[in-house]
Amino acid sequence: MTMTSTAQRPDPTRSQGQSMKPRQLTMMGLGSAIGAGLFLGSGAGIQAAGPAVLISYLVAGTLIILVMWALGEMAAANPNSGAFSVYAAKAMGRTAGATVGWLWWLQLVVVIAAEALGAAALLVTVWPVLPVWALSLVFMALFTAINLAGVKNFGEFEFWFAILKVAAILLFVGIGAALLLGWLPGVASPGLANITTNFAPAGFGGIATALFVVIFAFGGTEIVSVAAAETENPARSVGQAVRTVLWRILVFYIGSVFVIAAILPATSEALASPFAGVLDVARIPGAGSAITLVAVVALLSALNANLYGASRMAYSLSKRGEAPRILSRLNTARVPAVAVGISVAFGFVAAVLELLFPERILPALFQLVGSTCLVVWGSALVSQLILRRRADRDGTVLPLRMKGFPALTIAGLVILAAIFAVGFSNPDSSRQLVSTFALVAGIAVACWIGARVSARRPEQDARDKEPADSAG
């Protein structure tokens, strides 16, 4: 991607704070998708596909790189808390924009609850100070307070969380490489036999199944485009963050998963906690507990970022008349406090449900998420295709331009279509896709009806005032 020399003027319509620093946005881009999907989901992917899960990561990784390039171009030109929801509205109409916004909000609300319960469940295994439901409540309360305190505090917390996650993964890849090369004293190298002798034990079906596990792992990366609205120089900040996507995927995801797949067989029980399993093979004392604590931090970091993203999307929907006005009210820290409250409410409910139905809520939450991120990513690619053509036709100068347009945007849509085709060929993922499309259709109908009602309301109000005015 290339930056032009065009300076971006401040947008007077952005009423929230603009105190997030470029380094915070960049680290959010690095750490936003490093959560349960990598620390826990990578093991599930290897169990499904064996070492061939690397193909799933390459396919999904290529797609998210193209999506982030497309989002980066639009976010630099129009920094807005509604991000891809706003871009979909500009490109395809009000109902499309509202549908994408509410779909993403619902997805994050469920993920927030799942991350709080997941972090609590992991922490209990090494420090059983409180039951899972109580720890989950503590986490929800803590990160609600952090988000209400202002974007500067949120950005700083996320910055240090991301640094810890990045450092831990780099150290893990280094230890794994040393183990594979036989550099660890007293530990025999397993070599590459796990990869070369049984690369795809479940065949194409396993790769297809793993693909949807991997897609969930990459979910959340798009939050950078939401946060761009609260940075001082969105074009420059977004450009820096988006440029990290390529090497982040190659080093963090492909590197980590290659190490795990090479060291742990696809049938290993240690894949339930793959990072700890690899470190146990390396015979590093206390490493399993340490990486579990890092995974807890990773989940809490993702919770923090997702709560931020969900509240800003609700704020944007409210500002555009697609949600109750109260959701756009800001507190003294320039934070949409009511939007934060409704975005976090389900997480508190889930903690209470965990008390009533122990160990049954977290699996149910993961099943609810489905493949909604695919719809969001698809809307981003379609929106960029339409808006970029419109800008080029009108001679609009863009501060950040996606290289290889329109070929790369179309390539992303082709990859997305192929993923849907593969998904419908598998019974489990097919049910997930059908449920997602049904949810999208339901939200779209509700948004369309809401738009019609809100459009008629001013006319009705005017008619209601006419008799009183004439009588006065």
Image (tube, rainbow, N blue to C red):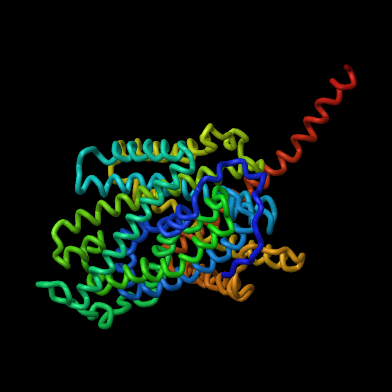
Q: Is residue 442 visible?
A: no
Give the residue at the far left of this rendering: 186
Residue nearest the viewer, comparing 162 with 417: 162
Q: Position of residue 126 (x, y in %)?
A: 19, 48
- Quadrant location of the N terminus in the rendered image: bottom right
- Quadrant location of the C terminus in the rendered image: top right
Q: Position of residue 400 (x, y in %)?
A: 61, 64
Give the residue at the far bottom of this rendering: 197
Residue 142's place in the image compared with 90, above or below, is above
Q: Position of residue 64 (x, y in %)?
A: 49, 66
Query: For the point 64% across and 55% down, which residue is it?
Result: 78
Quarter of the image for residue 179 reads bottom left
Q: Position of residue 395 (x, y in %)?
A: 75, 66
Say whether residue 16 is left or right of residue 130: right
Q: Is residue 372 visible?
A: yes
Residue nearest the viewer, comparing 156 with 299: 156
Quarter of the image for residue 410 reads bottom right
Query: For the point 70% across and 54% down, which residue is it?
Result: 93
Query: For the point 55% across and 47% down, which residue is it?
Result: 230
